[in-house]
Amino acid sequence: MMSIQRIHTGWNQKDKERKISQVAGVVAVNIWKISKKTLLNLENEGFEGETWESRLKILCELSFFQIYILFNELLIREEPNRENILKDVAKKIELTLIENVRELEIKNDEIYKEFYKDLNQRLSEYTEYEYVEGPSYKSKIMLGNALMPLMGSLDNNWIRMYVIDLEVPKMMTSMHRVVRSFYK
């Protein structure tokens, strides 16, 4: 079995050729981790996902937003494999979602059955707005609006502002770090 340190060291070697599936796997894992951290931050602020199902929907919304960020960052870098990377990332996140639905024994499998429809809808909405050095304020509002009905009743308007002011900048920093690691 390969150690974590060896994987980490091997990944950071400059000029190492990486397969698209490897890149997508790393990105998907990081997107899911960032989403989980963001959900934890929201819950620590008193915004509760009331069920495991609602928490998974929140993780999906946060992942959709990060895929939107990834799309734009790859577009800016004129990445020739952008489309394949995005497809593989979405596929890997969907598999993670399916695994979580099964582990948590959630009866409503619509969460993952609707994954691509919801992803495509959200991406088409986000891409209506400019992306200049990051997502526009309106796209951040859209993320906040998507999260509001999924979170608890603690002043839902505050959720939107909390996400815009505190969580999106953290997501951006983390996503930039992930994307930069491919271009060393």
Image (cartoon, rainbow, N blue to C red):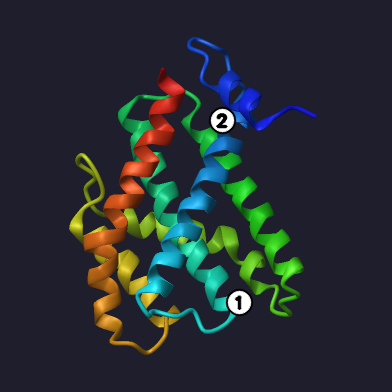
The count of marks equals 2
Mark 2 residue crowding within 10 angstroms, few (<14) / some (14–19) / many (20+): some
Which residue does the numbered mark 2 point to in the structure image? 23
Q: Amino acid at mark 2?
A: Val
Residue depicted at x 36% and y 45%: 69
Q: Residue 32: x, y in percent?
A: 53, 52
For this orientation, the residue located farthest to the top is 15
Tell me the number on the disc at residue 121. none
**Amino acid type at mark 1:** Trp
Q: Could you say which is closer to the camera, residue 61 or residue 113?
A: 61
Q: Which is nearer the eye, 157 or 125? A: 157
Q: Nearer the viewer, residue 111 or 58?
A: 58
Residue located at (51% from left, 20% from top): 12
Q: Is residue 73 left or right of residue 58?
A: left
| Residue 41 occupies quadrant | bottom left
Residue at mark 2 to residue at mark 1: CA–CA distance: 29 Å
